[in-house]
Amino acid sequence: MFPGRVKVTCVAFQPDSWLGLVMSLWTPPPDDAPRRLADLRVSYDIGELDASDLSANPLDAFHGWFADAEAAGLPEPNAMILATATSGAAPSARTVLLKEADTRGFVFYTNLSSRKSGELRANPQASLAFPWFAMHRQVCVVGSAELIARDEVEAYFTSRPRGSRLGAWASEQSSVIADRSVLEERYATLDAEFGDDIPVPDFWGGWLIRPVTVEFWQGRPSRLHDRLRFRRLDDAPPTADPAPLDDPDRWLLERLAP
Ligand SMILES: Cc1cc2nc3c(=O)[nH]c(=O)nc-3n(C[C@H](O)[C@H](O)[C@H](O)COP(=O)(O)O)c2cc1C
């Protein structure tokens, strides 16, 4: 009835009887057969989230969850997905490392000539997502972007290992290069030129994402997840009257449908 299938199965299993042939037709795929993407799912059943579980302000709530992620041994818990968009609203996303979370918001460092920095200059709005999958959790931030002060950048840059400081100088981040040797040769030249005192490149700096919303998401069974979102209460331009992240009176906590 299915000549094509019988032929393929015979080649694979070499049945020496009609019974063997029939059995081979019913053999399930081997364990290492690729699973269909549509069948991949996890039951989110290790936690719940109620307003009473969170601190009353977004900053302490974030630090509480970050401490949980560190205690659970998650790899790179400060890795976050940063989404930006051009002035024409074409989006792009990539991972960066959170280096500060304080009353202002969330800080990361990068090349100021990179694609992301160009997009943030043209359209100073961004979104962050902390993907803490092993805990069935994520934190999502939406806010405005602004460059942080040079003295703060210098303090952080100086704290980086020498190789990272040289690497920042060596890479014209996001530009097209002919091959890897371009990077390695530039690194070697800079390595020979600089001593231990490596200044911050003018084209390197830090961005502050000043949140408008900070959402805490906990996976639950049957896709009835818990979502609690802090929303900044005022509509003032962020730099005019920034709402400190640790002031509970400036933030409203709301539950969202999953
Ligand atoms: C775990 C991880 C952490 C990263 N951290 C940073 C970072 O802190 N700053 C940065 O500029 N790029 C970081 N990157 C590289 C970025 O994802 C990206 O490739 C680079 O910044 C260029 O992005 P752009 O061309 O969109 O500007 C990281 C990548 C990974 C996977």
Image (cartoon, rainbow, N blue to C red):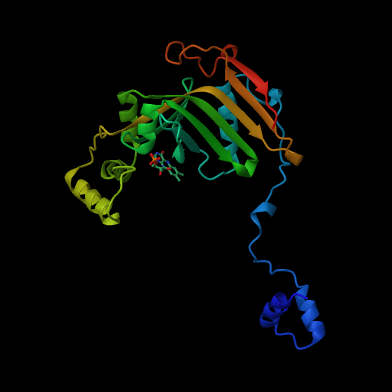
Q: Position of residue 68 (x, y in %)?
A: 60, 36
Residue ranking furthest to the bottom: 16
Q: Is residue 55 left or right of residue 180?
A: right
* Residue found at x 58% / y 32%: 139
Q: Which residue sits at x=50%, y=31%?
A: 127
Q: Position of residue 87 (x, y in %)?
A: 40, 29
73 left or right of 50? left
Task: Locate the C terminus by quadrant.
Answer: top right
Q: Is residue 254 above or below residue 177?
A: above
- Furthest toward the left, the residue is 193
The answer to whether residue 85 is above or below residue 211 is: below
Figure check: 14 above or below 178: below
* Residue 85 placement: quadrant: top left
| x then y, percent, for residue 45 | 73, 41
Q: Position of residue 109 (x, y in %)?
A: 38, 34
Give the mark count: 0
Query: Outermost residue, right direction?
Result: 19
Q: Quadrant of ligand 1?
A: top left
Q: Give the quadrant of residue 169.
A: top left
Tell which of 119 and 206 is nearer to you: 119
Q: Which quarter of the rendered picture does the N terminus lie within?
A: bottom right
Q: Is residue 191 above or below residue 27?
A: above
Q: Residue at x 56, y 44 (%)?
A: 74
Observer-nearest residue: 10 or 193? Answer: 10
Front residue (pair 250, 7): 7
Q: Is residue 165 left or right of residue 116?
A: left
